[in-house]
Amino acid sequence: MKAYLTRRFRFSASHRLHVDTLTDEQNRATFGKCNNPFGHGHNYIVAVTFSGAVDPVTGMVCNLADLDAFADKYVLQRFDHRNLNTLDLFDGLVPTTENFAIELHRIFQEFPHASLHHMHVEETGNNSFDFAGDSLPQAARY
Amino acid sequence: MILLTRKAEFSAAHFYWNDALSAEENERLFGKCANRNGHGHNYTLEVTVAGDVDPVTGFVVDLKELKDILEREVVGVYDHRHLNLEIPDFAHVIPTTENIAIAVWRRLEGKIPNSRLHRVRVYEMPDLFADFYGEFEEEGKR
């Protein structure tokens, strides 16, 4: 039996949307207040969905303790209370939440105990982004 | 076709334990969820049905009727119960969030008129939920 398990994680981080290939004026025109040179921050919510057979021994798609430990090590410790622009991950990559969702998808693909189905990232309560790799957009099930 | 979702809530106790495993193995696998005295959650159930809008009523299904079905088939059965000890669905199945979603699907399938059951989502808490789409065969169409 195939089920889908979704776990939400929260962290706070700062960022600035700015690309060096555009002029300051073009950056301001493109990114508006998100281009503030001092940066700004968000309380991000990441919802990661895994799919898989429900293990008949454990009744689980994957063990939450394993997933929480993985997320703590590879997401929370890495991004919580950080400035995203200063991280190697965003060296040359503008830290929009679209790009962040793609990078988080890459990170959770390495989780060894279940198959990643889709990433959902909320930048604010009004902005959210979904990424499911090569799957069709309607694969997003959040 | 329209997807229609109705929420319902119930509170119940459970614990995670597999009699086929040793006590040490249960405690290693399930951690604090293996406490045989049980613990509890406020569960939120979201049931999504798919159907066409009735040209006379403008409904996919009568929401009052759907609410009554959820109450009769699920909430009235699970609410303020110990899932492991009192509910036959979990006599031989560990009441993980995944297995609760599957059990709710079995309880509702074929019971909701003029529509097809599309998804059962069970929140154990706001940051953890499981979805079941009736994929009893692992190599299903998805």
Image: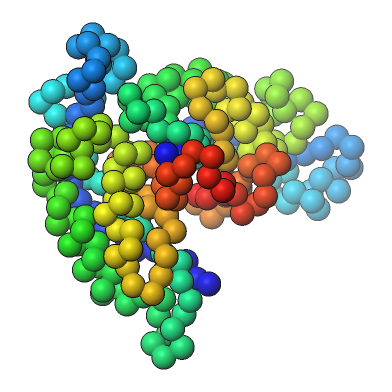
Using residue B93 as the reference point, say whether residue A74 is left or right of it: right
Residue at far top of view: B24
Using residue A81 as the reference point, say whether residue B68 is left or right of it: left
- Considering only vertical position in the picture, is B93 above or below A113? below
Residue at coordinates 82% horizontally, 37% vertically from top-left?
A19
Residue at coordinates 33% horizontally, 63% vertically from top-left?
B110
- Considering only vertical position in the picture, is B134 above or below A3? below
Is residue B77 in sight in this rendering? Answer: yes
- Considering only vertical position in the picture, is B110 above or below A107? below
**Number of marks drawn:** 0
Tell me residue A67's x, y (percent). 45, 24
Q: Quadrant of residue A92?
A: top right
Tell me residue A100's x, y (percent). 65, 36
Using residue A103 as the reference point, say whether residue B78 is left or right of it: left
Query: How is colour applied across the structure in the image?
Result: rainbow
Residue at coordinates 89% horizontally, 42% vertically from top-left?
A23
Q: Quadrant of residue B116?
A: bottom left
Is residue A77 in sight in this rendering? Answer: no
Camera-side residue: B6 or B72?
B72
Residue at coordinates 35% horizontally, 56% vertically from top-left?
B46
Camera-side residue: B14 or A56?
A56
